[in-house]
Amino acid sequence: MDRELELKILNIDLNEMEKKLISKGAKKLGVEIQKNHTFSPQNRSEFPNGYLRIREKTIDGKRLDTELTFKESVDSKDDVRVNNEYTTNITSTSNMIKILEEIGLVERYVGEKKRVSYEYKEQRFDLDTWSKDVYPDPYMEIEFTNVNLIEEILDEFDIDRDNVTSESINELIQKLK
């Protein structure tokens, strides 16, 4: 299990944010193309505290292992989301989808996402753009390893606190409906 502290920054220009990251000496981690399959129980739109997904991805054109992840929200305070992630590699997306359907889960959506990632002050910055039919607005996600850096980084990048959220992508999608 991995634990992460994350927040999303909405209503920002990803090109401008990328320029700021580069000007501050951030290390580019790569360009990731993802295909995400998100599942939930048949009678609910999501699990009580998280969601299940299959993620197929390439980084800088190299195909990586396909992962099955249960992402569990364990806390959300001060606009920071705390998650536990339980991840395992799978060898067949179609077989895993069949298994999940057989145990009563439903594929809620399939979405493609482009993610450009940087590391700055040992924190991860992901500039995310989903396929328009899933989530039309780009955003930045910051995964913190040090909660004490949150305010410092938000100030350093002149991030308006009104644009900071701890909502998951599923919660953001639901708000659009």
Image: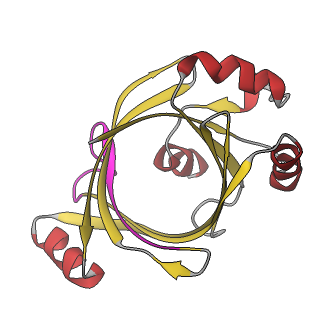
Residue range of the region highlighted in magenta in the rendering: 41-58
Q: In the image, what residue occupies the spot 84% across and 40% down?
A: 24
State the image coordinates of residue 111 (x, y, percent, origin top left): 51, 70
* Extreme residue toward the left, this view: 103
Q: Is residue 47 magenta?
A: yes
State the image coordinates of residue 61 (x, y, percent, origin top left): 59, 81
State whether residue 161 is above or below residue 96: above
Q: In the image, what residue occupies the spot 82% across and 31% down?
A: 157
State the image coordinates of residue 156 (x, y, percent, origin top left): 82, 26
Q: Residue 135 sits in which quadrant?
A: bottom right
Q: In the image, what residue occupies the spot 53% across and 36% down?
A: 167
Instruction: Pick the residue in front: 122 or 114.
Output: 122
Q: Residue 110 sits in which quadrant?
A: bottom left
- Structure colour scheme: secondary structure
Q: In the image, what residue occupies the spot 66% across and 68% down?
A: 132
Q: Is residue 57 magenta?
A: yes
State whether residue 40 is above or below residue 142: below
State the image coordinates of residue 90 (x, y, percent, origin top left): 24, 72
In the image: residue 152, left or right of residue 86: right
